[in-house]
Amino acid sequence: MTIASARGDYESRMNRVIDYIHDHLEDDIRLDVLADVACLSPWHWHRIYTAMRGETIAATIRRLRLSRAAERLANSTMTLDAIAGRAGYGSTDAFGRAFKEAYGKSPADYRATGSHAAYKAALLSDDAAGFPVFLETLAPMRCAAVAHAGAYMQIDRAMERLFAGLSAQRLLAPDQRMLAVFHDDPDLVPVDRLRSHACSPVAAGATLQLPLEDVVVRGGRYARLRYQGPYADMKGAYRWLLGTWLPHSGHEPDDAPVFEAYLNTPQQASPGELLTDIHLPLRAS
């Protein structure tokens, strides 16, 4: 076995762990079961995971559970008790402390005044100047990509596989850019049929091997909205961009998917400090 294939085997094992966590996020996740999923020694697998992923398994599980809770707070009427229970907390107090530590606000305050609230207010007041939108022309971008099917909030599963593939194929640079292309309208298409790609630009001459595939992100005119805050809140930003800014802008959307560019990651920044550029394709004027 070559060094590259050995590395790829370990990445595949870590990907199985991530998939298992996503599929059982609301269940009791046992470390011995994760060791079996990874097909690694119970004595060493967690140290391997931490070294390869840059965070402990407990931090991964907590981050993903709180992210799902934030999405429910921003986009549903589910009670705080129900959200806390489904996030694995035995009481709303324990959930509130953990949530405030990660998001800087109590769950109730976040629901009322999170970044989604500002976009909702701008949408309701038809305030097209509420947030800066920049017009720019981009060159086509050749990307390595991994397809994702299902809820857009879970595209980080494909991101994990993309990072692993880039690393195994020696294509991962220190400043590697990460994008996501979303092909369907989540208000129109059933969740289990939503299609998206986790993407990262690569050189024109780079050779890609499975699980990476070749995707070219459309070049041309775009409207770019820089969003700061948790990924769970971005639905409000999209609705303002499409429902308020676009009708006032004098521009027409092009027949191409929206894409997001991530300027930092949940491992680098708190949820409130995450920066995402939302790119809406426009017809040439």
Image (cartoon, rainbow, N blue to C red):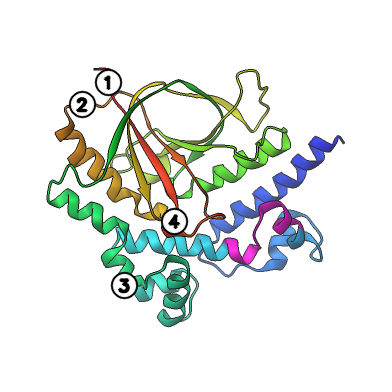
Q: x, y percentage for residue 187?
A: 28, 43
Q: Nearer the viewer, residue 84 or 175?
A: 175
- Above or below: residue 127 compared with residue 107: above
Q: Quadrant of residue 27?
A: bottom right
Q: x, y percentage for residue 33?
A: 69, 64
Please give the range of residues in magenta.
48-60
Q: CA distance from mark 3 to mark 1?
A: 41 Å
User: Do tag 1 and tag 2 residues touch (Cβ < 8 Å)?
Assistant: yes
Q: Secondary structure at mark 1?
A: loop
Q: Which residue is mark 1?
A: 283
Q: CA distance from mark 1 to mark 2?
A: 7 Å
Q: Which residue is mark 3?
A: 108
Q: Which mark is residue 273?
A: 4
Disc 1 marks a residue whose amino acid type is Arg
The residue positioned 46% from the left and 20% from the top of the image is: 140
User: Do tag 4 and tag 3 residues touch (Cβ < 8 Å)?
Assistant: no
User: Do tag 4 and tag 2 residues touch (Cβ < 8 Å)?
Assistant: no
Q: Secondary structure at mark 3?
A: helix
Q: Is residue 282 left or right of residue 90?
A: left
